[in-house]
Image: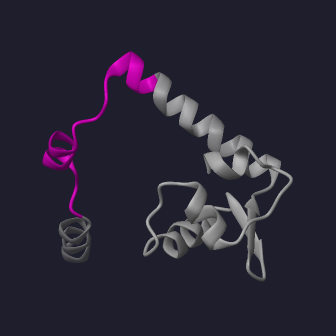
Amino acid sequence: MRFLATHPDQAFTQSGIRDATDVNAGSISVVLSRLEDRELVRHKGNYWALGEDDDIAAYTSMLESTRAANDRFGEEDMDEWLEYAVDDEDEDEDEATE
């Protein structure tokens, strides 16, 4: 994303993005596809470019909010979160027996 963000008016091939970044050759296609699913990049043919301004702004805002929350409250501890998480399967079984 950083590489494409520094060249917002240009499009690049996967190999061009790979060569300009630290993304490994076997991962570049998957990474770009996941970014496209989130509408953070777009592509036409073999060329990839930064997504639409509104989508990038929304994503950036979410990242900044997350950073601010982490700074204020600390990062979440996944093990602690999982300890208190509700198991959907257990919940579904409980609803079925009621």
User: Residue 19: where, in percent of width, then height?
Assistant: 57, 62
* Quadrant the C terminus occupies: bottom left
Q: Nearer the viewer, residue 28 or 91?
A: 28
Q: Is residue 67 above or below residue 81?
A: above
Farthest right residue in view: 9
Q: Main secondary structure of the magenta part?
A: helix
Magenta-colored stretch includes residue 20: no
User: Residue 78: where, in percent of width, then height?
Assistant: 22, 44
Residue 47 located left or right of residue 62: right
**Total tally of numbered discs in the picture:** 0
Q: Nearer the viewer, residue 55 or 13?
A: 13
Q: Residue at x 81, y 48 (%)?
A: 53
Q: Residue at x 31, y 23 (%)?
A: 74
Q: Is residue 94 above or below residue 7?
A: below
Q: Quadrant of residue 36?
A: bottom right
Farthest front residue in view: 19
What residue range appears in magenta? Answer: 69-87
Residue 20 located left or right of residue 28: right
Magenta-colored stretch includes residue 85: yes
Farthest top residue in view: 72
User: Residue 6: where, in percent of width, then height?
Assistant: 73, 43
User: Residue 26: where, in percent of width, then height?
Assistant: 43, 75
Residue 64 located left or right of residue 82: right
Q: Residue at x 19, y 74 (%)?
A: 93
Q: Residue at x 61, y 72 (%)?
A: 15
Q: Nearer the viewer, residue 75 or 27?
A: 27
Q: Is residue 76 above or below residue 8?
A: above
Display coloring:
one colour
Q: Nearer the viewer, residue 94 or 27?
A: 27
